[in-house]
Amino acid sequence: MSHHPPQPGSNLKMGLPIPNSKLGLWLFLGTEIMFFTAFIGSYIVLRIGSKGWPISPEVTHINVLLGGINTFVLILSSYFVVVAHEAMAKKNFERARMYLIGTFALGLVFMGIKSVEYFGKYQHDILPGHVAENDSQAANKAVNEFDLAVEKTGYNDLKLEIAALELEVAQAEEGKKAALEEQLSASKAAFAELGPFADAVKSLKDQVYAETIDFAAMSKRVEELKAEFPEKAAGVHEPHVILYGNIFASIYFLMTGFHAIHVIVGLILFAAVLKQGSNLDEKWTDWVENSGLYWHFVDLVWIFLFPLLYIV
Amino acid sequence: MAYRDTGHGEHAHHDVKYIAVFIALCILTGISVLADVVEGLPYAIKVVLVLSISTAKALCVMLFFMHLKFEGAWKYILLAPTTILAIGLPIALMPDVATRYYISAVPQDVDYEEAMAHHPDSHGSANEHDTEHPEGQPGEAHAPHAGESGNADTPPTPEAKE
């Protein structure tokens, strides 16, 4: 506390020599540090507690180059923010605006690359709870996906429809019989067309359930079926065993997902400044400094996530 | 406490060569990527190297981009509690999960041990790692491609990674 209360008109003020908004932002960043270290700490602890971990890029489809490029993108955007803030302080608002546009664009690039990576994970079904961790899980997963694919073709519905139609034909009056029979034969033709796929799936399923097929043969059969029925079997993934793959996917998506949310929030903060267009003035200097601090923190988190998830 | 109110923007005028910080950050990132791409680098060294680089990069960003180097002593008061709590959490979790104080039968661990018993050769660097940690902290060990079959299709070779 001050021993000499400030005199009116003097330039003494109480509190810290920084704007309140900046103090607030730093306090917020303090909570953010704990938020992310909770994730990183859990990851380290879970990983040390696991006997193994999937790290081969052939298995996890983690691309260190994409991660590296994204690291560079965030670092460059951080540099742009710092230059923008410097320009704001020097009242060079047009220069600040240009650099902020650059930051915003780089944020979008980061999200674009992240989307490519997420899409790859989705395509290979490396999603929490979806990963087969041993051969029998992989076989069961393939069978389940094939069952869904058969269901999707309408095979099972047609089967019921044909049974119902046959009953109707048998009970129908002479006049209506011809129309019903025509309908029945159309359904039967459609059913026959779906038959080969459904039969192939059933045969694979029987083998898997009877355990008369090993992983390599099952894998090969799935590939053959996908090649033979490209449209019908489109939803079936190639069997892919990743031991510890589910916890890996959980951690990957939890950490990169929360980081991506932070990037989006940062983009909104910069969008608010850019919305001012050429009317940008010194009223926005604190805003730019504070959102810049937040953006650097987002960069900081990525600096740790990149080696932890992509390299180590 | 009372301070001279020097107005806003004072902290923005330090003579920091931001471009130099930026170039340093890029070079450090490049070394991290190289450490992963280059073959033959021992795993333990790689881990220590990339995590040290990250710490160096984080310090660069905090000191210069976030201006912490030029801020008043409030930065210590503000950041000390969060730092202590952030470090404390993993340490508090460590005994339960990481050091296996409790005996747990995790199915993945059973599969892993079995795979290691069947294919000890295909996980050379995992074994190498184990010798570095005789207490058996196999956290960074390479997960095998589980099961006895199917390895021909998707080789789990750790060699491909390093």
Image (cartoon, helix red, strand yellow):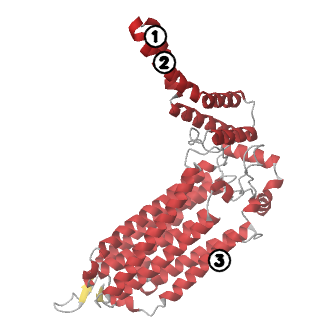
Question: Hey, which quadrant is residue A265 in on the image?
Answer: bottom left
| Three-letter code, disc 1 | Val
Instruction: Name which residue lies at 72% across and 46% down.
Output: B146
* Mark 2 to mark 1 CA distance (whole Å): 8 Å
Which quarter of the image is occupied by the C terminus of chain A?
Answer: bottom right
Packing grade of label 1 (10 A; few <14, some 14-19, many >=20) is some
Q: Give the x, y percent position of residue B18.
A: 48, 87
Report if the CB atoms under discs 3 and 2 are less than 8 Å apart: no
Q: In which quarter of the image is residue A48?
A: bottom right
Q: Name the residue under label 3.
A: B31
Residue bearing mark 2: A184
Residue B162 picture location, percent across and down: 73, 65
**Along the viewing direction, whichever of A223 and A12 lies nearer the viewer:** A223
- Secondary structure under the numbered disc 1 in the rendered image: helix
Residue at left offset 41%, top offset 6%: A174
Q: Which quarter shows the N terminus of chain A?
A: bottom left
Q: Which chain carries label 1?
A: A
The label shown at residue A169 is 1
Q: Position of residue A167 (x, y in %)?
A: 47, 10
B140 left or right of A113 in image: right
**Towards the viewer: B91 or A288:** A288
